[in-house]
Image (cartoon, rainbow, N blue to C red):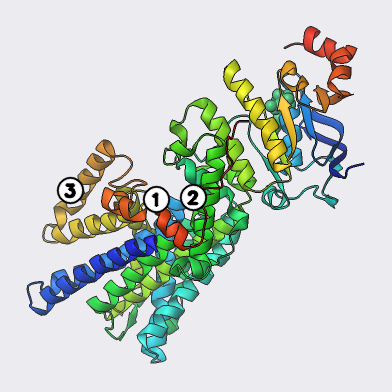
Amino acid sequence: MIERKVDALLAVVGLVLFAIIYGLIEADVIGPFWKLNIIIICINVIMSVSLNLINGYTGQFSLGHAGFMAVGAYVSVVLTAKLHLPFAVAILVAAIAAGFVGFLIGIPTLRLNGDYLAIATLGLCEIIRIVIMNINYVGGAAGFTGIPHYTTFTWAFLVMLATLFFIKNFVNSAHGRACIAIRENEIAAEAMGVKIVNYKVLAFTLGAAFAGVAGALFAHSFYILMPGTFSFLQSFNYLIMVVLGGLGSITGSIAGAFVVTGISAALAGVPEFRMIIYSIILILLMFYRPQGLFGYVEITNLPLFRYLKNISPEAKKAMGIDTEDSGKGGKA
Amino acid sequence: MAESILKCSNVSIVFGGLTAVDDFNMYINEGELIGLIGPNGAGKTTAFNLLTGVYAPTSGTIEFCGENVTGMKPSDITARGMARTFQNIRLFSELSVLDNVKIAFHKHIRYNLLEAALRIGRYMEDEIRTDIEAHKLLKIFGLDDLAGETAKNLPYGAQRRLEIARALATGPKLLLLDEPAAGMNPQETQDLMNLIAWLRKEFKMTILLIEHDMSLVMGICERIYVLEYGKTIAMGGPAEIQKDPHVIRAYLGGDD
Ligand SMILES: Nc1ncnc2c1ncn2[C@@H]1O[C@H](COP(=O)(O)OP(=O)(O)O)[C@@H](O)[C@H]1O
Ligand SMILES: [Mg+2]
């Protein structure tokens, strides 16, 4: 089908990009510093796109995304470092665990609106971090050591690609449209038969689950995992990526993760100016482009993709669907 | 005699000290086109909000298709076949005209999350069907050329029509229209009234119509309920209503 053509095109673009970067890493054109940063960009893309599902598509203001990442990170390292399970299993269980925590947190908090939800999620994220700090089994405040270094560029990139496809297809389905309807007008959405609490919890759970996946990838990029990494400042950083890239846009989330991570990496050599330059860029951007780089716009809205997306009459006929029996002479 | 599809018994709602709807009793038979009129602030919109579950009544019961729906959530009531439009238009204003209608097909979607994420199973079939049905509806309302337009950019009359199209997409047995002609010019209003009469014939729809302007409903409604200060001051056919002294006083001597 036509939508599948767009999918295939995007998959090819993704895999070509993968092959190029992979080649450059193998050929040592990309050194260890930038290689690590590329992996971090992939992880941050997963974080920002999953946060965008909650904040940008469903219109709920969550400010605790690093908390779910922490759950995924810690669950996965226990599985690999302590129980010696394969990485793929650890990623999957991390997703389920973080999703479950998201579900439990979502049920009471998603009844709150706007600022209240932001404060509640921020607080709960801090609680998660403090709980982890007090569990000696995972190293407490000193951190978890001896983590196998499983996260390669291949893992990070391919998991990112899978996440992007999942979320793209979700937001373009009836379930995603239900979430977007909630963002646009809650009362109207409910009047159209959308169970708003269910869909808010669903978006929150899915977002949390993917943050768990990102957490698992993140944890296995280093030899040590510290609970302090997952502070509310980190949640804030992901929010910046989403807002800067553009709410309600997957393209935007990718761009946001890329720009923010890239800037921090590029300015790593001048730590004293880093925050200043970073802030100036943000201020300028919000001044000249308050909707973010790609607010509510996707790269697939470009003419080429539009052409591919139009379902042709022939295709409809092939599916056995007659298009020409619509209500004639509407206004009798 | 036809089945009553809607029955309100002694429905009241109190906001603070104000009884916005007071002991409201109404029945609607299948296929009827009923008017609900009254001066501004009479409680018409509040009555809609009670029927559709936006507010739970302080007292009284609402039965829809033989089922007690009092206190149910709006989404559950919509799923049972009641749909509405809003007096102050509530479109999904940043979305396309087509997506506005597609969202309203929600309850007809059968595919689950996994099928959606992987675009397998019933996904394609349901999406194509939704697309086609949505275009059909838009065509009926003369909106098919505007399918790709952002809803908020439509002219006012078209926004009102889109709201009705969207409500119909939910597949209702009973359609509630809250001042659908508000803000339209006389020609648009006349076209709309013709369209409503046509819809009713074509879809065998039962319709409850709120209208501020009495003359508009007189021509097309079988029965009319008249509200004033939350109370039902009259009910009957257009001829009776026109002669009713309470109605004449409410409309001529009232604060309107
Ligand atoms: N949520 C609410 N809280 C308090 N008062 C309300 C609320 N909704 C409606 N009212 C009041 O109820 C009365 C009826 O309003 P409404 O149903 O909108 O009238 P109508 O649609 O007939 O013009 C008005 O006095 C209005 O101020
Ligand atoms: Mg009103």
Q: Position of residue B187 (x, y in %)?
A: 58, 18
Q: Secondary structure at mark 3?
A: helix
Q: Which residue is mark 2?
A: A180
Marks 1 & 2, CB-CB < 8 Å contact = yes
Q: Nearer the viewer, residue A90 or A57?
A: A57
The chain containing the residue under callout 3 comes to: A
Q: Which residue is mark 1?
A: A248
- Can you say whether B65 is above or below A101 in the image? above
Q: Residues within 10 Å of mark 3 (few under 14, many from 20)?
A: some
User: Reading the chain from its start, which is encountered first: label 3 or label 1?
Assistant: 1
- Residue sitting at 52 percent across and 44 percent down? B100
Q: Quadrant of the N terminus of chain B?
A: top right
| Quadrant of residue B19 within the rendered picture | top right
- Residue sitting at 80 percent across and 7 percent down? B253
The amino acid type, in three-letter code, at marker 3 is Ile
Q: Quadrant of the C terminus of chain B?
A: top right
- Can you say whether A315 is above or below B168 in the image? below
